[in-house]
Image (cartoon, rainbow, N blue to C red):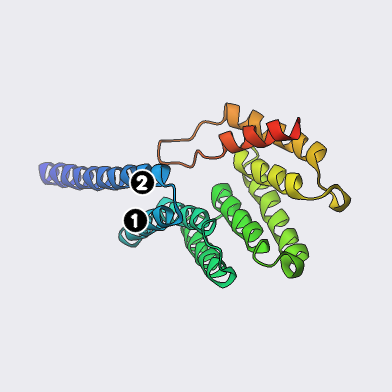
Amino acid sequence: MKKYLVLLLFITTSGFAQENKKFEKAMEKNLTLLKDAKTGEDYTNAANAFERIAKAETKEWLPSYYEAFALILSANDVSDAAKKDAVLDKAMEVAKAAEAISPDNSEIVTLQSWITSMKISVDPMNRGQKLGMEASVLTSRAIELDPENPRPYLLQGTGLFYTPEQFGGGKDKAQKVLEKAVEKFNSFKPKNKLMPNWGKERAMSLLEECKK
């Protein structure tokens, strides 16, 4: 009986390890696809690839996270306001699906803040005040959930950079936050190779713009 239980445990553990490797391999392949993407279509294809993994791996939050991330980037290539809105709405829906799997996750909340900020650009006059406040609340929550995560500081600094001084933004205010973002990026180490690790180059680039 004891030998049977040991054998059963070995088979179960071995099967889990194989499934885990399969998941990691699929994620690594699609992360490369995402990294190499250049056009809106490329990012859409990457989003679709992560969506397929998310449907197969319903207990993993990273596939939905990267699907939402890819959709955000694909939206930059959409000029039609209604279509861009639809892409961003889908990105938020997917981000919330990731959050349902992994609640109180700073990385996911950061994405939600980014999506909210991008939706302002579709109709700045009518959305700026309301969605700007929502994005700010989400960014603050992401920092509260993980003060060492550099990405919400990047979003915060980016928002200040593109906000006119008369409305509380400007390069001087952005510089202080972006300096903190870069400092966090320099010490940040993802838990594994699948975890989010984007934003450092953007933070450094914006910081240089602030100093001009």
The local secondary structure at tag 2 comes to helix
Q: Residue at x 81, y 43 (%)?
A: 170
Tell me what residue is drawn at x 55 percent, y 48 percent: 107
User: What residue is rendered at 59% in x and 27% in y?
Assistant: 186
Direction front: furthest residue: 79
Mark positioned earlier in the residue sequence (2 or 1):
2
Q: Residues within 10 Å of mark 1 (few under 14, many from 20)?
A: many
Q: Nearer the viewer, residue 108 or 75?
A: 75
Observer-nearest residue: 66 or 127?
A: 127
Mark 1, secondary structure of its residue:
helix
Q: Which dot marks residue 33?
A: 2
Mark 1 residue type: Ala
Q: Position of residue 3 (x, y in %)?
A: 11, 41
Kindly indicate whether the residue at mark 1 contacts the one at mark 2 (C-beta within 8 angstroms). Answer: yes
The CA span between labels 2 and 1 is 9 Å
Q: Quadrant of the C terminus?
A: top right
Above/below status of 126 relative to 23? below
Q: Does the rendering let one see residue 145?
A: yes
Residue positioned 51% across, 65% down in the render: 87
The residue that disc 1 covers is 49
Spot the residue most to the right.
166
| Foreground pick, 39 / 28 | 39
Tell me where residue 10 appears, x and y as whole percent.
17, 42
Q: Could you say which is closer to the camera, residue 6 or residue 2? A: 6
Residue 60, compared with residue 31, is above or below; it is: below
Looking at the rendered structure, the kind of residue marked 2 is Leu
Q: Position of residue 40 (x, y in %)?
A: 45, 56
Q: Is residue 92 left or right of residue 205?
A: left
Q: Position of residue 24 (x, y in %)?
A: 31, 43
Q: Judge left or right: residue 167 versus residue 15.
A: right
